[in-house]
Amino acid sequence: MLKTAIMPVTKKTASSASDKALIAKLVKQIRNYVLEYGTVKDSEMLEQAIADIQKHHEHQKRKSGQPVIIHPLRVANYICLAGLDAPTVVAAILHDIIEDTTITHKDIKNRYGAWYADIVRGLTKIKFLESPKEGEVDYLEATYQRMLKAMTQDVRALLIKLFDRLDNMRDMESMPRHKQRRISLETLNVYVPIAERLGLTQICQEHTELCFKLLYPKRYNKTLTDIDELKKARIPTINGMRISLQETLEKHNLEYKTINPLFVHPSHRIQEKGPIDHVLEGFRIIVNNSLDCFKALGMIHTSFNVIPLKIRDYISNPLWNGYEGIQTELRIEGEQTCIEIVSEEMLKKNQHGIMAHWQGSPNELADYYKIYLNQLDQMAGDKDVRMLEVMSYVQSDQIQVYSPKGDMFVFPNNATVLDFAYGIHSELGNHCIGALVNPSSVGTTKKRVPRERQLFAGETLLILTDPGVQPREEWLEQVNTSKSRSQIKHALEQQKVISARNYGRTLLERELRKFGVEKGADNWIKSKGIKEALKIEKLSANKFFQEIGLQKRPLKMFLRKYNLLEYQQTGRLKEMLGTEFWENIFGGNKNIFLIEDVKNPLIRLASCCFPIPGDKIRGFICNDQEIEIHVTNCSKLTRKNKRLQQNKIPIDVAWKISKKITRSHIIHFQVIDGKGILFKITKIIKDAGVAIINSETSAKKNKEADIRIKLESISWPVFHKIVVKLRPLKFVKKIWEEFPDSI
């Protein structure tokens, strides 16, 4: 239970005597709290923590001149005032001890246990060992990632961090101006959105106001003056409006607590540079319970002119940050104004989040913030996610959508059906082909939508899947959440790895049979000599298959090096030991990767030149996971452009696709818009004797357009003949073939 408002800022003291008095006061308050709400073991831990910070922070001073020990004690006291549990209080006392002293993570683990050690390390800034400017972002990102991981493992770490930053922001006057600005901007961009997402309105507002004061002191002071002057000028009118509301409720005999005007808060003006044109935000009516909220709504709606489409019921459907209440807009005394109707319990919850009514269960705390923490957890597990992406998620407007079972899911307002599928389960996302929107009883028309379609607030979706569908590169353009992108990237990497292993296994078995070794690759690789060779090379069986599949490890060199195929064992080897055989079969100087399927996940057709079967091509092994294919005359393969070939292994590649195979093709053009373009394109296609099934054209910015043309079923040679004639057209900037899941 929240005991009182957050502790006001402590003014800078001038003497050590007053510092000692403050330390004694804080220690006493913390001890009393832990004694009342904690266990005997908690009290023992507290005494140990107080002793440790007194010992290790001794003689350390803050910029303000105060002893360093005052800061962790104040943060711990905020935790007490917020009504959190005793272990969180102890962790708050220790939160700076690793960063500012010689105490290590291991020391904390030995003295207090793993939970305390992990919480404290998660809140510890990664210091700069050196100070190269280009490395600062990496250190900062590493600190954020560590903090993010700690927060998702236990949300209490996040609350400690918010109070830690609040105390530092209250004590910033002694800091140099450049640090004031840097820390304020970080607070505004990182901690304010997090507090808002957790429903900690009071902390959010104070953080924002302190940032405003430090970043724009002149405008801040003017804002305070303008608000005060507007209040004085508007008080008679505002009082008249409040009395009208009061008389309406009393006329209907509704018991209420208070009716208070809501004034513009200074924090609301940090992004606004213009003059303040109003000071009244609206009125807050506080009643006894949820039912009285709806009664009050009915009373004022029948007594005043209501603004249409402005009613919001957040009691039956709370906002993503836990906000509850009813909002509406009326005309009172001829003036349009907002009305908020809440109970006392709702108000506390809206201002302080779960800290307003939390009864001391960490599980309850985690459950309350479950949706938010689940999203952050996905980001914390992805090393590619930068803090910018996390903040983009944190700051974005949110929408609520539902599963057919009624479970609520929260997504950024630009999320798609595919994001929703991945939000439920990775396998559901990996095989998603679309969804049914608002599926209901039999006989009702069900609307089917594709996976790239945007979500809309309040709708229910039933995800449709196809086991034969797998994620493709273009799916990354169909999602807008970090979790979805991470899952798709992981699935694509797995496809490439599995494909390389399977190809390597098949290739190896094919060559073993030529030497009379009939047992499969999996059995052959288990033999003693092979296992010893792999051990020396530090290779697992799967990694070996993968390197063979990518043609990265020539078989000839490997087998000769370890004498793995002797002619006595193979029977046919002796007569086949010619140089030509070794070069062609065991991958000497002529390693040729044969492309049998353009949709093989092991290969990637380069987006710069878009090769198709029939083109002369070159390949490059990238990151041990895929082979990138270019046409031989690609501009990126010129001597002037060597960036492509850095850290990539060249490999000979060739098409091995049957000329008899026919299929439908979709050609995608990016063109410079103009007259007669579509006619010139379709003429080339028709002159080749090929029918067009359908076409789509969409205009883009910068006088460009996209054209998609679907052709009838034709062979690859015919398709190649058409593309070769289309590529030289002056208005064509790019041309490539699309590979949808089904054509």
Image (cartoon, rainbow, N blue to C red):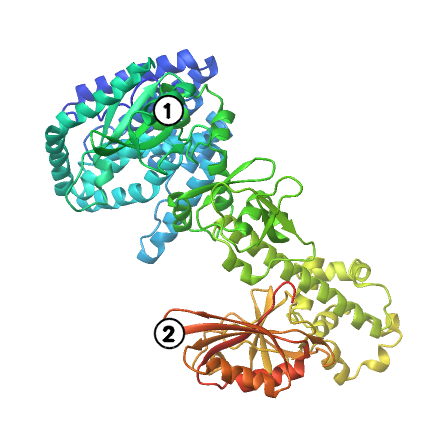
**Of marks 2 and 1, which one's residue comes earlier in the chain?**
1
Tag 2: residue type? Lys
Q: Which mark is residue 298?
A: 1
Q: Nearer the viewer, residue 330 or 611?
A: 330
On screen, 399 above or below 578? above
On screen, 579 above or below 196? below
Q: Quarter holding the N terminus?
A: top left
Tag 1: residue type? Gly
Q: Is residue 264 visible?
A: no
Percent across and percent down for residue 438 are 57, 43
Q: Nearer the viewer, residue 225 or 312?
A: 312
Percent across and percent down for residue 339 are 30, 29
Q: Please, what secondary structure does the residue beneath circle 2 have?
A: loop
Q: Is residue 739 visible?
A: yes
Q: Which mark is residue 415?
A: none
Q: Nearer the viewer, residue 480 or 73?
A: 480
Label count reads 2
User: To which quarter of the image does residue 500 belong?
Assistant: bottom right
On screen, 162 above or below 482? above
Distance, label 2 to label 1, CA atoms, is 55 Å
* Tags 2 and 1 touching, CB below 8 Å: no
Name the residue rendered at 50%, 59% in the picture.
477
Q: Please, what secondary structure does the residue beneath circle 1 have?
A: helix
Near mark 2 (Cα within 10 A), the count class, few <14, some 14-19 or many ≥20, is few
User: To which quarter of the image does residue 216 belong?
Assistant: top left
Residue that numbered label 2 is attached to? 703
Percent across and percent down for residue 325 are 38, 27
Q: Nearer the viewer, residue 70 or 392?
A: 392
Q: Nearer the viewer, mark 2 or mark 1?
A: 1
